[in-house]
Amino acid sequence: MGRGLIIDNIHTYTDWGLILTAQEMEPPKVKTKYIDKPLGDGSIDLTEAIIGDVAYEDREGTFKFDLLVPPENRAGLVSAMSSYIHGRMRKIILPDDPDHYYYGRMALNSFVGQGLIGKLEIEIVCDPYKYKLDPTVKSGSIGTSGSVTVICSNSRQRVIPEITVSAAVTIVFNGNSYSISPGTWRLTNIIFVEGQNELTITGVAGTTYSIEYQEGAI
């Protein structure tokens, strides 16, 4: 398979005959906030004051392609590509990072025909984080001891997990206790941070649980 992007269910080389010649996916800029000290040295850094973590701006990417199709077929193909991506929110996977996807709004920025070769450029403005292809899931059941400790490893983005249990349980997270009934829950006080996140689930033996969350990295 030739080098290209996967845009939702389309591969730019296999389906469109585009050869990826250059790509640039910039890291997201940090949203900073500094207040000058009028009569003192330096400034006060309030970057993490509101949410207790760093926030980021959108991430931007640019991708350049060669289009090797007969000139008489270009107009139809470019029109089809425009209909699929221009102004659309799409999920894209880069050839050098097949385990993650980016999600954002795409644009067909330019197309220039140069003899037998067409030059085409696609841009995307996307979320600051890149996401694992599939959500992370930790599942199992409570044993005869009546409790189980689950370690959930998370990437950079903070995330509220979706917790599903088959019977009433008590969950201890960061020293705080939460009682939930059977069903699926998102508890706003249970927020996974980067690294290892530990939950202890207590309930009747045989109770099943599932903890699902989407990891996002920079």
Image: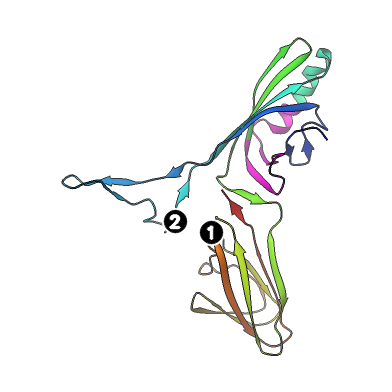
Q: Which residues are magenta?
A: 81-105
Q: Residue at x 50, y 74 (%)?
A: 174
Q: Residue 104 in the image: state x and y as whole percent.
A: 62, 40
Among numbered discs 2 and 1, the one appearing first in the sequence: 2
Where, by quadrant of the figure, is residue 90 drawn? top right
Q: CA distance from mark 2 to mark 1?
A: 9 Å
Name the amino acid type tagged 2: Asp
- The residue at which mark 2 appears reads as 53
Q: Is residue 191 magenta?
A: no
**Quadrant showing the N terminus:** top right
Q: Residue at x 35, y 46 (%)?
A: 33
Furthest toward the top, the residue is 115
Tell whether label 1 touches label 2 (CB within 8 Å).
yes
- The residue at which mark 1 appears reads as 158
107 or 16, nearer to the observer: 16
SS of the residue under disc 1: loop
Name the amino acid type tagged 1: Arg
Where, by quadrant of the figure, is residue 102 drawn? top right
Where, by quadrant of the figure, is residue 16 drawn? top right
Please, is residue 196 above or below residue 107 in the view? below
- Characterize the local packing of mark 2: few (<14), some (14-19) or many (20 or more) Cα atoms within 10 angstroms: few
Please, is residue 39 above or below residue 203 in the view? above
- Characterize the local packing of mark 1: few (<14), some (14-19) or many (20 or more) Cα atoms within 10 angstroms: some
Q: Is residue 90 left or right of residue 196?
A: right
Q: Is residue 92 magenta?
A: yes
Please, is residue 11 above or below residue 186 in the view? above
Q: Residue at x 18, y 44 (%)?
A: 38
